[in-house]
Amino acid sequence: MTPGRTSMNGVKKQNLPAKICLQCRRPFTWRKKWARDWENVRYCSDACRRGIRDCP
């Protein structure tokens, strides 16, 4: 593993890190495709990133 990378191998789904989406204000959890860039992830989906989703 590269220094500075976080490995989520062996972590239960309920223990994964979570954030709140800036657009829809819903919680979302860590996904493997975000592993390299988790610090910079701000939105739960492309729709929220583009501003298509309305706030609940």
Image (cartoon, grey):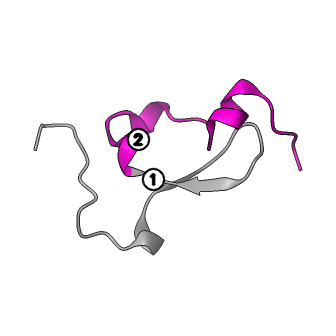
Q: Closer to the camera, 11 or 48? A: 48
Q: Identify the residue at image location x=40%, y=41%.
A: 34
Is-magenta flag for residue 55? yes
Q: Is residue 25 left or right of residue 4?
A: right
Mark 1 and mark 2: Cα distance apart in space: 7 Å
Q: Which residues are magenta?
A: 32-56
- Say whether residue 20 is magenta: no
Under tag 2, what secondary structure?
helix
The amino acid on which the numbered mark 1 sits, given as a three-letter code, is Trp
- The answer to the question of whether label 1 and label 2 lie on touching residues, with beta carbons closer than 8 A, is yes
Residues packed near mark 1 inside 10 Å, few (<14), some (14 to 19) or many (20 plus): some
Residue 50: x %, y % from top left = 71, 25
**Quarter where residue 16 is shown:** bottom left
Q: Look at label 2 and name its amino acid.
A: Trp
Q: Is residue 23 left or right of residue 20?
A: right
- Which residue lies at the image location 36% right of the left edge and 50% below the top edge? 32
Where does residue 9 sit, x and y in percent of width and height?
23, 62
Q: Position of residue 39 (x, y in %)?
A: 43, 35
Q: Residue drawn 43% across and 51% down?
A: 31
Q: What secondary structure is marked by label 1?
A: loop
Q: Position of residue 6 (x, y in %)?
A: 26, 48
- The residue under the point 43% across, 70% down is 13
The residue indicated by pointer 1 is: 30
Name the residue tied to disc 2. Answer: 34
In the image: residue 28, left or right of residue 32? right
In the figure, 24 relative to 10: above or below? above
Pick the quarter of the image with the N terminus: top left
Q: Which residue is outermost to the top?
A: 50
Quadrant of residue 36 within the rendered picture: top left
